[in-house]
């Protein structure tokens, strides 16, 4: 074999090896990079601070914030939910006296990071206790309301044991999609918020 052919063969082997390495890096690194782009980590210190008094998983709070507002403090939904955690003003006003605040309720608080997290974390804790830690019920109630979830939990095909809502009905597509989206975000944020554990 001539020297030229040997060199060409060596280059081909090196090129193939480089290609294999690049593919391996692409397969191993790209999914993590895409997850970081899809699920930003914003207001982490605030989320940890406001979830702590209620022993809420900050990863769950982050997943709710991400799904509700995409971390947009000025978000307002078509039905009037406001801020990071997209609470309805009437819900926040109902929560306000339970927080023992010495000042009157002001709806503009929902557009601040600390205000939205204060009301939102209290409400998540309330739902967590009400549904005894049934994550699907908590997430669904955050979206569709407690009354709707209470009805679903009475349906043996959705809640066979009477304690855990195993699925949101097909007819409630928006809530079903919401629960799936929060759960997906929650799986990612668990890796972020519990990386040191």
Image (cartoon, helix red, strand yellow):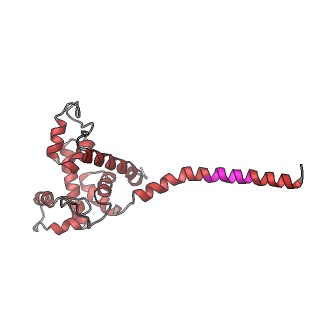
Indicate whether residue 135 is drawn in magenta.
Answer: no
Q: Position of residue 97 (x, y in %)?
A: 10, 60
Indicate whether residue 19 is drawn in magenta.
Answer: yes
Q: Position of residue 69 (x, y in %)?
A: 29, 60
Q: How many marks?
A: 0
Snapshot quadrant of residue 77: bottom left
Q: Position of residue 85 (x, y in %)?
A: 25, 59
Residue numbers of the magenta segment: 13-22
Please state which of residues 92 and 149 is positioned toward the viewer in this rendering: 149
Magenta span: chief secondary structure = helix
Snapshot quadrant of residue 172: top left
- Asked whether, in this view, residue 145 is left or right of residue 34, the answer is left
Q: Residue at x 33, y 49 (%)?
A: 181
Please state which of residues 62 and 31 is positioned toward the viewer in this rendering: 31
Q: Residue at x 19, y 53 (%)?
A: 123
Q: Position of residue 48 (x, y in %)?
A: 31, 58
Is 150 situated above or below 95? above
Is 121 situated above or below 177? below
């Amino acid at each position: 074999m001539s020297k030229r052919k040997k060199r060409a063969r060596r280059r081909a082997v090196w090129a193939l090896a480089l290609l294999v390495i690049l593919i391996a890096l692409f397969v191993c690194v790209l999914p993590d990079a895409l997850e970081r782009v899809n699920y930003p980590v914003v207001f982490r210190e605030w989320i940890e601070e406001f979830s702590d008094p209620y022993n809420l998983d900050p990863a769950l709070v982050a997943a709710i914030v991400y799904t509700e507002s995409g971390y947009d403090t000025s978000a307002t939904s078509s039905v009037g939910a406001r801020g990071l955690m997209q609470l309805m003003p009437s819900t926040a006003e109902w929560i306000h006296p339970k927080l023992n605040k010495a000042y009157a309720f002001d709806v503009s608080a929902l557009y601040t990071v600390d205000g939205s997290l204060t009301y939102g974390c209290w409400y998540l804790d309330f739902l967590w206790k009400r549904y005894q830690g049934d994550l699907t019920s908590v997430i669904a109630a955050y979206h569709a309301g407690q009354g709707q979830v209470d009805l679903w939990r009475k349906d043996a095909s959705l809640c066979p044991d009477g304690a855990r809502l195993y699925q949101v009905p097909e007819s409630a597509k928006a809530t079903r999609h919401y629960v799936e989206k929060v759960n997906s975000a929650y799986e990612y944020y668990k890796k972020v918020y519990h990386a040191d554990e």
